Structures are given as structure tokens and as C-alpha cells.
Image (spheres, helix red, strand yellow):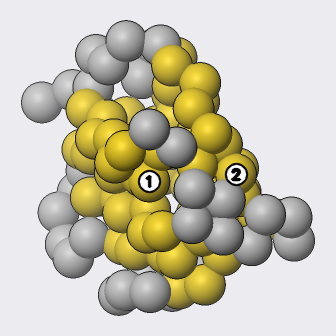
Amino acid sequence: MAQLEVDVVAAGGKVWSGAARQVSAPAADGDIGILAGHTPILSVLRPGSVRVVPAGGGAPLSWHVDGGFLSVDSDQVTVVVDSVTSAGTAAAGH
């Protein structure tokens, strides 16, 4: 199965980086789900939860964000946020 390369970055530095099957985020116009092969997009994020499903299996990772933006291009997903709080099984860093 195709996968995404994901970087989640906050003002203080990299939060998580790795391969994922899916990314969900709170876009300004509504929640968005990203899978491999998604159309290129640049979206403003509103406060809410960013969720990453790792490619290797395991529990989804989740963070609460206070806004930022999401960029998707050629299966590369970059999430840049103002501030982030771990909300799920994710430990900061990877």
C-alpha cells in the first residue's frame, strides 16, 4: 500500500516525522482526511486534533493544535502549527 511521508512541526521544533497511511486534520472549511495520492492542497487549520495513522501499524497518534496550516504535495504532508499538545498515544518525537 502506498504511504505518506509526514512532518508535524510546531514553533518549538519537530513534533513527529515518519511514514503514515493516513492523516486527518481540522481544516478551516471542515475536517480533512489525507491518503496517498491526494490532490495537492494548502489549507489553513483551525483549532482541533491532528491524527496520524502510522504506516507500520500500531496505535494512531493524535495531537491537539491551536491552528496553523497543512500542505500536501506528491504524498508529502507537512503540518505546521502554532502550538501542539499530545492528545493520544503519541509521545513527542519519533
Q: Position of residue 91 (x, y in %)?
A: 51, 86
Q: Secondary structure at mark 1?
A: strand
Compute the Cα span from label 2 to label 1. Answer: 10 Å
Q: Residue furthest right?
A: 12
- What amino acid is at disc 1? Pro
Residue 9 quadrant: bottom right
> Which residue is disc 1 drawn over?
26
In the displayed structure, 40 sits above or below 34; it is above
Q: Are marks 2 and 1 in contact (CB under 8 Å)?
A: no
Left or right side of 13 for 74: left
Count neighbours of disc 2 (C-alpha within 10 A) and say few if under 14, some if 14 to 19, many if 20 or more: many
In the displayed structure, 72 sits above or below 10; it is above
Q: Earlier in the sequence, mark 2 or mark 1?
A: 1
- What amino acid is at disc 2? Gly
> Which residue is disc 2 drawn over?
68
Q: Position of residue 92 (x, y in %)?
A: 60, 82
Residue 59 quadrant: bottom left
Question: What residue is shown at x 51% (from left), y 35% (from top)?
Answer: 77
